[in-house]
Image (spheres, grey):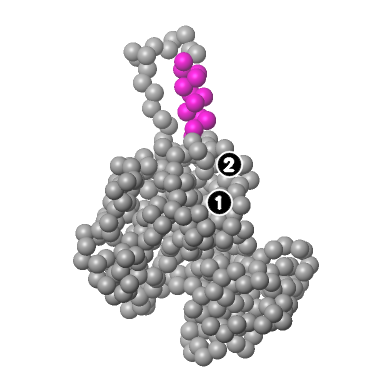
Amino acid sequence: MRRISHSAVRQVLVVRGEGKSAMRFQLGKCIGRGQFGSVYQALNLDTGQTVAVKRIRLEGLPEDEVTQLMGEVDLVKSLSHPSIVKYEGMARDSDTLSIVLEFAENGSLGKTLKEYGKLSEELVAGYVIKILEGLNYLHKSEVVHCDLKAANILTTKNGNVKLSDFGVSLNLRAMEQMHDNVAGTPNWMAPEVIQLQGASPASDIWSLGCTIIELFTGRPPYAHLNNGLSVMFRIVEDESPPIPEDCSDELKDFLSQCFEKDPADRPTAELLGEHPWLKQNWGVHKELRPQDSIPFLRRVSADLHSRADITKQFMDSPRFSSSTCDLEPSPPRQHTFVKSSFSQGR
């Protein structure tokens, strides 16, 4: 791969937004490389804010592909959620598209795996709670991620996650035109995507199951197979990817639901958020500072406190009798999402 000179890395990028004054960003070190471009850490020379700049090479791309890429950027502008990497701006010249994104300090969960090795089941559950919140928002916004894996899940210094890299994200309203395109990475692909039946929110649920195995074992399903075609054949032919034997029964059940062969049988992200495997780990995350917690976690924290308060009220009541009172947890409140931004490749 061609090395970029130090002087090129230090160049200043000027971003002119609609109806806004121009912003200047000085590019710093490269923090990620992909097939079509690289990601740089950058400094906003006007505010001092640290951002990430994803630079995509346009040289040689047909104009229709450039148009599709610009459409994806427009899609990202409309997304705004604590578990989705935020879009900050864009600049284009003759051969490069530069997309300015929110900076996630800890990098990707893929990087975390390389630095610390496989993660405990409890920690994986904590990440999954937040990943599901982001997926639920995307799916309710009629967007499919299509390439969910540890390398595309960023983390902040407080342990929150940011779903990133929508380079192959699909808007559901255009799905009928996309059925003949295989998008994603083989080890994390759902069988219906491999069979060119089209992606859907259920495809992201399958990929989530693969990502959980990746975080728990350090490797995605079928990592022992070197040939991508062999991986895809096994995904289609096997009843489900191999589920680790040393995980809890609750996690095994969670994974079995993610790996339902028929997409129609897989639960939604919102429904999976109520699974017992995650509920038993709620208490670990309820102490997140309010400004860092996402809506689902705030709801969980409120539910835990609410149940504790109700129990105490009944226990303190002179009319309380264990033979006549059977407490049940209150039903969870519905998610509340803020409508209206993007992604960061690693």
From this view, report whether residue 306 is shown above or below residue 176.
above
**Element at label 1:** loop
Residue type indicated by callout 2: Leu
Residue stretch rendered in magenta on the structure: 303-315
Q: Which residue position holds label 1?
A: 160
- Which residue sits furthest right? 46
Q: Are marks 1 and 2 in contact (CB under 8 Å)?
A: yes
Spatial distance from mark 1 to mark 2, Cα to Cα? 10 Å
From this view, report whether residue 117 is shown above or below residue 142.
above
Instruction: Give how far across and how far down residue 230 sits, in percent.
Output: 27, 72
How would you rate the neighbour count of disc 2 (Cα within 10 Å): few for under 14, some for 14-19, many for 20 or more?
some
On the rendered structure, is 197 left or right of 78? left
Q: Main secondary structure of the magenta part?
A: helix
On the rendered structure, is 304 left or right of 43? left
Q: Which residue position holds label 2?
A: 288
Residue closer to the observer: 275 or 264: 275
Work out whether residue 30 can be spotted. Answer: yes
How would you rate the neighbour count of disc 1 (Cα within 10 Å): few for under 14, some for 14-19, many for 20 or more?
many
Residue 279 in which image quadrant: top left
On the rendered structure, is 270 left or right of 55? left
Residue at x 27%, y 56% (from the top left corner): 242
Check residue 133 in the rendering and tell me which mark sits there, or answer none.
Answer: none
Residue type indicated by callout 1: Asn
Residue closer to the observer: 122 or 101: 122
Q: Earlier in the sequence, mark 1 or mark 2?
A: 1
Instruction: Give how far across and how far down residue 8 sits, in percent.
Output: 69, 82
Residue at x 48%, y 24% (from the top left corner): 310
